[in-house]
Image (spheres, helix red, strand yellow):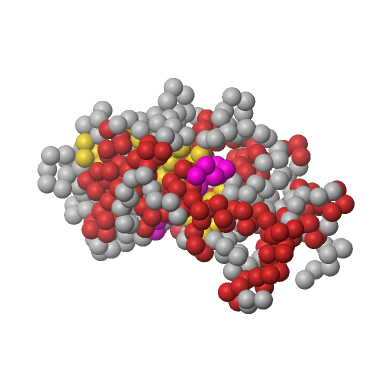
Amino acid sequence: MPDHNQTPWSRRLFLQQGVTLASLAATTPLFIERSARGVMLPVGSLVSSQAGVPEDRILVVVQLGGGNDGLNTVVPYGSSDYHRLRPQLGIKEPGRTGGALAIDGSDEIGLNPAMSGFKELMDEGVAGIVQGVGYPNPNRSHFSSMDIWHTADPKGKSNGWIGRYFDNTCEGTPVPEAGVVIGRQSPLAMQGETQLPVSFERAELFRWMGTDMDSKLEEQYEQIARTAHVGAVEEERSQNAFLKRTTLDARVSSDKVRKAVARSPLVTYPGSNLAGQLRMVGAMIRAELPTRVYYVTLGGFDTHANQAGQHARLLDQVGSALNAFYRDLQAQGNNSRVMTMVFSEFGRRVAQNGSGGTDHGTAAPMYFIGDMVRPGLLGTHPALNRLDDGDLIHNTDFRTVYASVLEDWMGANSREILGGKWKSESLLRGG
């Protein structure tokens, strides 16, 4: 352990020193964050939510890991180039067996037939698709491209864009449960300097696990939790106060989350992996946890071979899970408070390969669900007769999409968070 009298504690350091929760759930008092000068943002850079923007708005992020094939999700069935380059994988026009689902307002672009759950939301005017999203000089490595998306940085070297949102809106003091991740690992997108998300795969594992290793630790943990409080200035500056505050915050978070998830949902969810994650998110929203951002992930989209059946099964899971999640929010009366954003690290190459699949590509659609979103097809589909070495050329930079999410929905200063001006057309109705 470090010398407590000389080494300033940061939240990250504390977590590294053996907090035995099954989650990064500890939080740090302001005095410790002020002492950790090396990881603090300058005070002048801190921003708060914009006036007039409700503080109870929620963002749910769904990551499709592996590179979802955008061309066989949002299908340009009216393009002869599409069918020429995908003679086996190409999806036919609406009305044919296995044909695309027609999208109102377009006679050339439809949805994969497995996306019927999502199509239902589009028909109701609560889902929109931003076409052709990407970034300059695209990277076809899963890890590098995901880092770029997570950081909103072409070099992928900074903290996460959502983490920076929390850093800039929490005034330097981490907030318990501000960000929640369902999964084994916390994505880079959610990691800031002063704010780290609560992260768990199953709610029952989000608890103190010291007694699993040694039953004698139970009384010590209970003693810390019982005596935790925010005391006088002198005590607040002690390492003992930090330990107590951290333990109490973690315990309260754990209790609230597990109690929320234990309740039965108001609708029936499918039995899929993604639906299970969204069911937990819906339960926490219903329980009114003070969470601004939830993050879930579904993998398996790296479809290099035998894509057709595998991709259809994945898209069916996505569409049906998103539909059930929205129905749950409707039943709760929270459907106007929650925006859901779906993305993948890249799309696939336009031409199918020799293994009945597609290889790593570039631009792809993003998907948004909520009463507040502009419905239908947004932006322009990438041209299939003007490619960059066989890849689509993006026409919407993903940072402009992030900027709209941050400013128009979350009420934050996107310039401070994204490091530049990326604001463009709003994703919201009437924006």
Q: Quadrant of residue 78?
A: top left
Q: Would you say 237 lies left or right of 19 here?
A: right
Question: How many numbered marks does the figure carry?
Answer: 0
Q: Residue at x 84, y 48 (%)?
A: 232
Residue 43: image location, x then y, percent: 76, 39
Q: Residue at x 17, y 44 (%)?
A: 99
Q: Residue at x 36, y 44 (%)?
A: 266
Front residue (pair 306, 392): 306
Q: Residue at x 43, y 46 (%)?
A: 282
Return the residue found at the far top.
Answer: 430
Q: Which residues are magenta?
A: 287-299
Q: Is residue 303 above or below residue 287?
A: below
Q: Is 295 contained in the magenta span? A: yes
Residue 81: image location, x then y, percent: 23, 43
Front residue (pair 74, 328): 328
**Residue 80 visible from this viewpoint:** no
Residue 152: image location, x then y, percent: 55, 45
Q: Quadrant of residue 353?
A: bottom left
**Residue 34 visible from this viewpoint:** yes
Front residue (pair 53, 67): 53
Residue 24: image location, x then y, percent: 60, 59
Quadrant that contains the N terminus: bottom right
Q: Is 242 contained in the magenta span? A: no
Q: Would you say 71 lies left or right of 17 here?
A: left
Q: Is residue 182 above or below residue 266?
A: below
